[in-house]
Amino acid sequence: MSNLNIIEEIKKLKAERGAVILAHNYQRAEVQEVADFTGDSLELARKATEIDADVIVFCGVYFMAETAAVLNPTKTVLIPDRVAGCPMADMIKASELRKLKAEHPGAIAVCYVNSTAEVKAECDVTVTSGNAKKVLSQLPQDRKVIFVPDCNLGSHISDLLGRDYILWPGFCPVHAKITKSDIEEARKAHPSAIVLVHPECPKDVRDASDEKLSTGGMCAFARDSKVREFIVGTEVGILHRLRNENPDAKFYPVREDIVCEDMKLTTLESLRDSLKYMKDRVQVDEAVALRAKNAIQAMLELS
Ligand code: 13P
Ligand code: SF4
């Protein structure tokens, strides 16, 4: 069946089910095109609180769909491929965080949204890469802060705010592939371009770049910048949105192989089947969801 036919089927099923399709910026181009809304983790979490539909189909990785389910306990949240996970989110368990909290009594526990609902439930507040600086800058200065699981985002904010955090050694294996010499080579090839990298990149890569931004932040920066050439240091899926929104600009991936395989698991076929068979439903234990929701809502209020 051609893509056009599958897209028609998706549109028909979406109307029948009263569904809204959300997609992360790293999704395949054809999935982004059929979605009602494409965005970064913060934009999608906000959108999930505003949706007036019975069914949300979340094209992204599991923790993102789980966040939408936590925020919408009465709605049906579907993920087209439940195997789509985030290796970084799985680098800390709730039991490990509880142990860390016990070692630092009185510390504020903050987690990156790239974490499980169980880990969020142990935290006072969550952050995304788009609001981490704003949220963390508003926390009381006289208390220690535990930040999990991404040590790169944590050290980036620590550098920006001049504060020490108790960091967990989690990281994104996709962004960890980008090296300082990749940035240097890309600059040599495109000397007029601005280098945008995601804060999940290692420190030497961040230091070699011009701007450290969430995927949504990259879109806003490219839209507003006078410069029209950009080297992009993050997952290549973002290039679709950047190029669509800025037809007058040039975007060069720092490397073509910066691909999050989990993000690419969702296809037009799996999205269609998700709507057709109403699968896979994302369900979170009620008690965990309630506590995780408090941490997510604290973030939304501070950002
Ligand atoms: P953004 O919030 O910037 O979209 O990042 C999500 C993510 O998983 C980056 O790897
Ligand atoms: Fe997780 Fe990295 Fe994939 Fe983002 S790019 S979903 S942090 S593995």
Image (cartoon, rainbow, N blue to C red):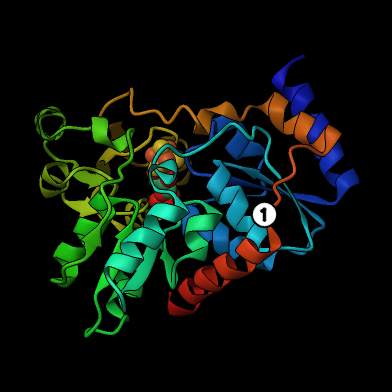
- What is the residue that sits farthest to the right in this orientation? 16
**Residue 190 position within the rendered picture, expressed as x and y whole percent measured from the top left:** 16, 32
Amino acid under label 1?
Val
| Label 1 Cα neighbours within 10 Å, binned few <14 / some 14-19 / many ≥20 | some
Residue 237 picture quarter = top left
Q: Is residue 233 left or right of residue 164?
A: right
Q: Where residue 79 appears, x then y in whole percent?
A: 67, 40
The residue at which mark 1 appears reads as 284
Q: Is mark 1 within 8 Å of ligand 2?
A: no
Q: Whole-percent x and y of residue 293?
A: 59, 68
Image quarter of the C terminus: bottom left
Please give the count of numbered marks on the rendered protein: 1
* Image quarter (top left, top right, bottom left or bottom right) of the N terminus: top right
Ligand 2 sits in which quadrant? top left
Residue drawn at x 37%, y 42% as measured from the top left: 248
Asked whether residue 197 appears in the rendered view, the answer is yes
- Would residue 260 be found to the left or right of residue 177 on screen? right
Q: Is residue 242 in sight in this rendering?
A: no
Residue at position x 34%, y 67% in the image: 102
Report the residue at 30% width, 54% height from top: 213
In the rendered structure, the answer to whether residue 4 lies left or right of residue 115 reads right
Residue drawn at x 50%, y 70% as measured from the top left? 295
> Which residue is nearer to you in this view: 9 or 149?
149
Image coords of residue 269 (percent x, y)? 71, 24
Q: Is residue 125 left or right of residue 75?
A: left
Check disc 1 and report its element: helix, strand or loop: loop
The answer to which image quadrant residue 180 occupies is: top left
Q: Which of 149/10 is in front? A: 149
Q: Is residue 53 above or below residue 187?
A: below
Residue at the extreme top of the image, as rendered: 1
